[in-house]
Image (tube, grey):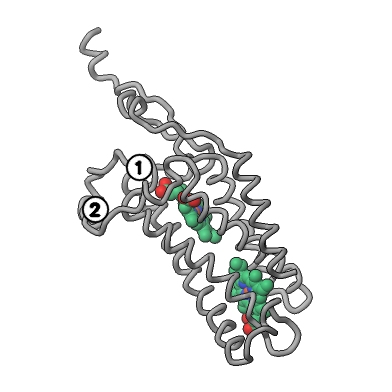
Amino acid sequence: MTAKRQREPAALSAVTVWDLPVRLFHWILVGLLSGAWLTAELGVDAMRYHKWIGYAVLVLVSFRIVWGFVGSYHARFRHFLRPPSAVWHYARTWRTGEHAGDLGHNPLGGWMVMALLALVLVQPVTGLFASDGFFVEGPLAEHVSPAMSTLATRLHHLNFTLLLLAVATHVAAILAYWLLRGENLIGPMLHGRKRVSADEAAAAPVVRGGIVLAALLLSALAAGLWLLLG
Ligand code: HEM
Ligand code: HEM
């Protein structure tokens, strides 16, 4: 009986890692970017929706940047942006899973998140100044020279290609964790929780919803954009 008990895996406890605002941010962002891509491909008539979706992306990504300073523990940049030495060590020991204790973004993933956020921010910002030269233009295109608007349009196209590459890398990395390390990262991004040992659970920082603060922040950012463009 004792021997059997010794062979049993240690009991696991569920701890909340991703707050609700981070999870909603992630999956709404995926939906909005898909919508922005679709409406960009559908032609001139759909461009009205393209712009509205783009504004929503701008508000959402601005929210996530502010949330990186005021959100719950694992959402904060200072808790997942690590120095190059930590990133290098993590990359070298990735296969052995030495760092299995990372509850939030791992050292490498943290910088990938920053790259994704930067690309997602540049996309709508360049869109504001972009123009197809005939039928559609961003609301700020008329406030800059034609050369600047052309540059913004080129960047809008180039950045989208980089964004697609980054997203493909991101999804490939998530799949690699699943297939090569047996770690399912998608579940926690849906329900917020990870299962860890009782000791790790006891040491884990408390993560709370913060949904009211997030809603206030989103409203303020949306109002700010409306004032800027109105
Ligand atoms: C983050 C969301 C956005 C994504 C993913 C996105 C993506 C794209 C893509 C892929 C195109 C190229 C379509 C093609 O030539 O086949 C495009 C064109 C365009 N976008 Fe966006 N866009 C976004 C946000 C915005 C915003 C916020 C605005 C302005 C309010 C905007 C304004 C434009 C304009 C004016 C064009 C036409 C440029 C041209 O024809 O060369 N976009 N967008
Ligand atoms: C438009 C496509 C996508 C973009 C722009 C994107 C962007 C991001 C960003 C910015 C984060 C960081 C979350 C935060 O801290 O706020 C993240 C995390 C994450 N994403 Fe995505 N994502 C995309 C698609 C996907 C898809 C399709 C999946 C599922 C296969 C996925 C799975 C995840 C997971 C599991 C995490 C958490 C990673 C971790 O545990 O460190 N993402 N993503």
Q: Is residue 149 above or below residue 194?
A: below
Callout 1: SS: loop
- Taking the image as shown, residue 15 lies to the left or right of residue 203, namely right
Q: Residue at x 65, y 46 (%)?
A: 216
- Kindly tell me whether residue 180 is visible in this rendering: yes
The mark that comes first in sequence, 1 or 2, is 2
Residue at which label 1 appears: 182
Compared with 169, 146 (above or below) is below
Residue 57 location (% of width, % of height): 62, 61
Q: Quadrant of the N terminus?
A: top left
- Check disc 2 and report the residue beneath it: 86
The reply to whether residue 40 is visible in this rendering is: no
Quadrant of the drawing holding the C terminus: bottom right
Q: Considering depth in this image, is 89 or 97 the residue closer to the camera?
A: 89
Residue type, mark 1 in image: Gly
Q: What secondary structure is marked by label 2?
A: helix
Q: Residue at x 39, y 59 (%)?
A: 112
Left or right: residue 212 versus residue 6 is right
Mark 1 against mark 2, which lies toward the viewer?
2
The percent coordinates of residue 102 (x first, y second) are 32, 42
